[in-house]
Amino acid sequence: MGNLPSLRYFWPESILTVAVMAMFVQDLVVRRREHRVQSLTIGALFWLTLTALATYLYPSGTTPLFGGLIVHDPLRVFFAWIFLAAALLTILIVPKSKQVSDARVGEFFGLLFALMLGLYLMASATDLLMVYLAIEMVSLVSYVLTGFRRADRKANEAALKYVIYGGVASGVMLYGISILYGLFGTTRVVGDGGIGAQLADVSSRLFMAHAFGGQPAAQLALVVAVVFVLAGIGYKIASVPFHMWCPDVYEGAPTPFTAFLSVGPKAAGFAVAIRFFFAIFEKNVPGVGWVAVSDVPWPAIIGIISAITMTLGNFTALVQTNLKRLFAYSSIAHAGYLLMGLAAASAAGVQSILVYLMIYVLMNVGAFLVVISVSRATGGEHIADLNGLGTRAPIAALTLSIFLFSLTGIPPFAGFTGKYLIFAALVQKGGMWNVILAVIGVLNSAVSLFYYAKLIKAMYFEESRDDTPMPVPGLYTGILVSLGAMVMVLGIYWAPLLRWASAAFGGTTAT
Amino acid sequence: MNLQIDHPTTSMLLTWMTFLPLFGAVAVLGVVGLKAMGVLTREAADQAARVIALVASFVVLVLAFFLWRAFDPQNPNVQFVHHGNWIPAYNIQYFLGVDGLSITLVMLTALVSFIATIASMPWWPGNTHLDGHHFTQHGVAGYMAMLLILQTGMTGVFCSLDMFLFYVFWEVMLLPMYFLIGIWGGARKEYAAIKFFLYTLAGSVLMLLAIIGLYYNGPQEILDGRLVHTFNILKMAQWGRAGGYGAAPLVMGLSFIRVAWVALFIGFAIKIPMFPFHTWLPDAHVEAPTPISVILAGVLLKMGIYGILRINFAILPEATKWAAGAMAVFGTINIVYAAFVCLAQKDLKRMIAYSSVSHMGFCLLGMSAFTQQGIDGAVLNMWTHGLISPMLFLIVGVIYDRAHHRNIEGFGGLAQQVPEYAGLLGLAFFASLGLPGLCGFISEFTVFLGAFPQWQTLTIISATSVILTAAYYLWAMQRMMLGKLNPKYADMPDVNWRERLTLYPLAALIIVFGFYPKAIIDLIEGSLRNLILPLQ
């Protein structure tokens, strides 16, 4: 589809673009007003609602836009809702968090909308250059938001580390893209003449083999290119070996942004990964499902990364005492779990990722919200600061327990739903390596209980020095209770969520 | 084909029994809310929570009585079925029902939970020296809510006939147990709580994979025009008996049924607990407050044996035959090893915890013989141990509340000071060591009778434990009760009314089933006959 007709499918992105500018203008206008933060929050919510409305009114069906740079399909809509949920929670949390000064709330919201725009593009890019641009857009804004507290040395350190790692990762990715371009002569991944179509076409594969003087060389170049592209994706989702930035950035960034960072860009990274691997290396055969079109062992590569990522994340989390660092390693471990769904290389696997990501937004932002509540009252962000929370702030403690058990994957909480679907996808796919991966996965969830339970132990089993009730804003309590309720409901009745995910990818329900 | 036709809903009774405690827990939360709003004082809220817990678990006990009266022992199929769709995409069903195997355990759960709830009431009026530190005195509402959720989880495990539902209940039960040990437990409560949680979770996640494997290699049926697999335990059992799982692809070069069997068995063996996975149990028991020990020994340990019978035996009979020898050997190790460990214990509660390990070994030995007496004995042993071990832990609780220690050597001559207590302790000890006329004897004897034709050497080795058991119980009794009265305990009060309310019903049942075990055997025999038919 050409550029002008494509705009019809580009409403949310257009609104987000306007919103970025509108937030900065509003910030200037209300600068001297008394209810400045409130008015900015209402402004941000207004633009978010408008974006959500435009997302809701998206036409159905699959259409390539802007000459194939991005695609409009149900998958992108599903991810859009994940981003919207994360952004809504972040906007609600920021004003009372005491982490972003009142004078800069408008700036924060403006940058958040720019980040949202990048995420929307990441979730729909079908051209490697577009993928690269979208990832860079998300990264650049993330660097700024990470170093948002300019006076804080930790924030500066975090932002710098983030930039350096990000530069390396995206450079490597760009190199991988250039190899792919050299192999295929295009950066399109879908459509006629795209990389996927070329790989699926036997004669073109033969040509490629010929051009490199034999299949193995081309094969090797392709595998190398895949691994390089994976660097950019792995950096966004915080998987090994591109996870090192994660703990420092999580610790240094303002906590509401950490919460957003742990769900939004991670989800977008998975969107890119799903599109990239399924468009290039798999073909959807009606009645059979996804079949591989090349010999590239990408599920094995993903599987190995997944196993290392979750094991490293979980075992490192065991020794953390800072809550934000602990959740950083927990989020690395979760990237590993989610990659298992990708390693299954099936529609059921992708659906499990979608369901898990949606649930992960609820439980992880919920957990961070409790951390924010504690740190705004006590000023501390360590496990010991949770001591006695069970009596000091019973609702926050109860909901954090729900989120933690959910993160562990214990029924009847929603995290179990996600884990169950991932393991089911792996076992359904069968084969020795998938079973081994599933065993590593379940043992990892048992390990993760140990550090999640440390938090619960602090809240309920330890005595606090200070027994006075801890003030939690009513808004936070409301958000916590609704997130906790959703986590419980989705743990018991998840049929609609699964149906939605099935409609977003694969179209068929798992059996 | 509509699924409901196979086992149509006939009764909502089990749903009520399962979820009534949960409603009680919600009510307790409501009470907490009222307290937070300032409507109720702290004392009033505590009392209200206690009353809610008592009423809920009593109503369940009454319902269990009706269940027992209405159950048809002649019919070996599942009864009181409540069946509906839950998650259609994976054909997960809400499917509750009981047969001869589970009805005794459902009844046991109701009984033990009620007794544990009584045992969770404050010690006695006007008792000041406990001063808020006793587990009955702090965080009462939370305690009662956890106790009620635990009851829902336990009842649900025994009633579920859908494997997914079974797994959900199995895990749900872990959370309240973790908090009950961790918050209201003894000195090393954190360690014991997390050890219990980690052991059980490690086992159950492997179980989850095996369950998913059974699902994908299991029977298929048509639901809403789609061909789907099923989690229905009865259909899986049918499929397994017909050898359907034998066709499943190899897993890492090993036969699927054996891998699945072992994964499930480890999950259940941790719960039994079977040597070498038993080490969480003494810690959990020693640190848990008395009523929680009562539930732990009375109900939770039975879940392991129940799971093996319900899933391993019923669904994977071929692999069960293959593993029979190993089960018998591990059963024997449990019996004899734990009995020796008991001899060496100085802490009374730890000794009784190990004696539970020893007694659960009888179940393993009995059921691995695949004879009618053997398996009857195993299930009967769950029932008798479910009566005796709660009584033993209550007995320990009585002395701990008074002396604040459990060191066997630290007492002496208590029989003259607290004769009623001594009598009850004697009854419980004798029941546990298998004195004829008390119910422990019947189940042990039946197990030996059933196991001997199959495992002669192992049965003879196991039988030596009868002597060891007698030795450690009698020796402990001699050190605690006989001899010269320890002057420290010259003013020790005898059992009070709350304790009588918990001890005498159990004592009465121990005697009744010692003389009339037929009441239980009649209930279980039909279903168990069907269960071992493909194994013989």
Image: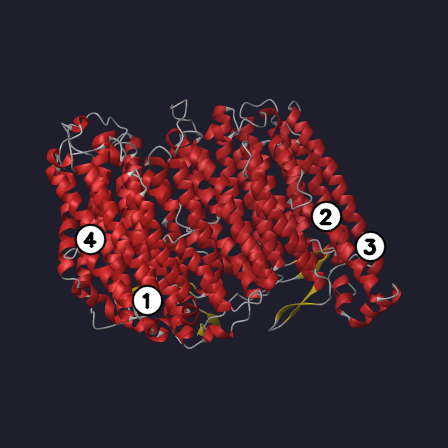
Can residue B121 be seen here?
A: no
Labels in figure, total: 4
Q: Earlier in the sequence, mark 4 or mark 1?
A: 4
Badge 4: chain ID:
B
Q: Residue at x 69, y 37 (%)?
A: A141
Label annotation for residue B61:
4
Asked if the residues shown at circle 3 and circle 4 are in contact, with their CB atoms under 8 angstroms apart, the answer is: no
What residue type is disc 3 on? Ile
Q: Quadrant of residue A265 in the image? A: top right
Q: With A206 as the anchor, is A20 left or right in this view? A: left
Secondary structure beneath disc 4?
Answer: helix
Chain name for mark 1: B
Q: Residue at horizontal 69%, vertical 49%?
A: A233
- Circles 4, 2 touching at the beta carbon (< 8 Å): no
Indicate which label's residue lies in the foreground, 4 or 1: 1
Label 3, residues with CA under 10 Å away: few <14, some 14-19, many ≥20: some
The percent position of residue B248, horizontal first and vertical second, equals 52, 72
Which residue is tagged 2? A231
Picture coordinates of residue B34 (x, y %)?
28, 35
Residue that numbered label 3 is attached to: A179
* Alpha-carbon span between mark 2 and mark 3: 14 Å
Q: Mark 2 falls within which chain?
A: A
Residue that carries the numbered disc 1 in the rendered image = B456
Q: Residue at x 48, y 56 (%)?
A: B206
In the displayed structure image, the side of residue B54 where residue A106 appears, left or right: right
Viewer-nearest of labels 3 and 1?
1
Residue kind at label 4, given as amino acid type = Leu
Identify which amino acid the numbered label 2 is placed on.
Ala
Instruction: Tell me if I can see residue A248 in this picture.
Output: yes
* Amino acid tagged 1: Gln
